[in-house]
Image (cartoon, rainbow, N blue to C red):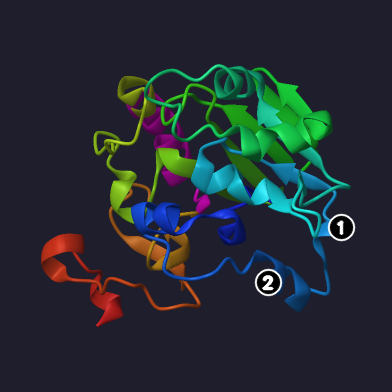
Amino acid sequence: MIDASFDTAKLSDKQRRNLGILTESRVEESLSLLGLSPEDIDIVLMTHMHHDHSGGLTRVNDQGELVSKYPNAKIIVNDVEWYEMRNPNNRTRGTYLRENWEPIQDQVTTFSEYINVIPEIQMIHTSGHSNGHSIILLKQGKDTMIHMGDLMLSHVHRNPLWVPAVDDYPMKSILAKEKWLRQAFENHYKFFFYHDQFFAVVEFDKDGKEFVDYVLRSRPPLIPFTDQQDRKPDFLG
């Protein structure tokens, strides 16, 4: 599994309001559609440990205790991210929450520059969005999919200079995006997203301007596509 979303059951009404949470987490429901349960997950890859990605690593059990939601999983995260999460600064203190990592710390494996999870799956440290942020490559035969994590929040952010205010190290984001977007466009990688409102998967042309292939999200976006705001692709009508 890649990242863990929120555990909405852990959130207070104030947190739900501040975070804009409008629906309940559906991770367990999605797993069940595949015939899986949280106990079946053997590896969780964490692009970074911000609250909206790591909150779902833990849950509150029937005794009111915080426990791991994926008790049989190895949780893989970059060593810089693991350190900064445990030693947050004034900017990151509100997103690196102890409740999300203390119950799972014995399950964690860290890496430095990169790790080959299996021959077809590689995690690579980039920094940028957070200091320990990582991207993920999935390979099968001649095909490669790339998950840019929060370096590329959505298909709109494929311009390397379009860096959101939530990036902690924006210049590192720009450098990482320049490198990996160029490689992805030239080699026909397919992008898949965590935050994109409209697309689950996209492949761009070699210049990164036109859509070659795409898969829309299964659920409609909360905010409709508009020409003015999003430069809506023609094929969406």
Front residue of 193 and 56: 56
Residue 129, magenta (yes or no): no
- Secondary element at image label 2: helix
Whole-percent x and y of residue 110?
73, 24
The answer to whether residue 14 is left or right of residue 133 is left
Circle 2 crowding by C-alpha within 10 Å: few under 14, some 14–19, many from 20: few
Sequence-wise first label, 2 or 1: 2
Query: On the image, numbered disc 1 is attached to which residue?
Result: 39
Q: Which mark is residue 30?
A: 2
Q: Nearer the viewer, mark 2 or mark 1?
A: 1
Q: Is residue 147 visible?
A: no
Magenta span of residues: 174-192
Q: Residue at x 52, y 42 (%)?
A: 51
Q: Is residue 218 above or below residue 166?
A: below
84 w.r.t. 150: above or below: above
- Predominant SS of the magenta segment: helix
Q: Is residue 86 above or below residue 117?
A: above
Q: Position of residue 133 (x, y in %)?
A: 52, 30
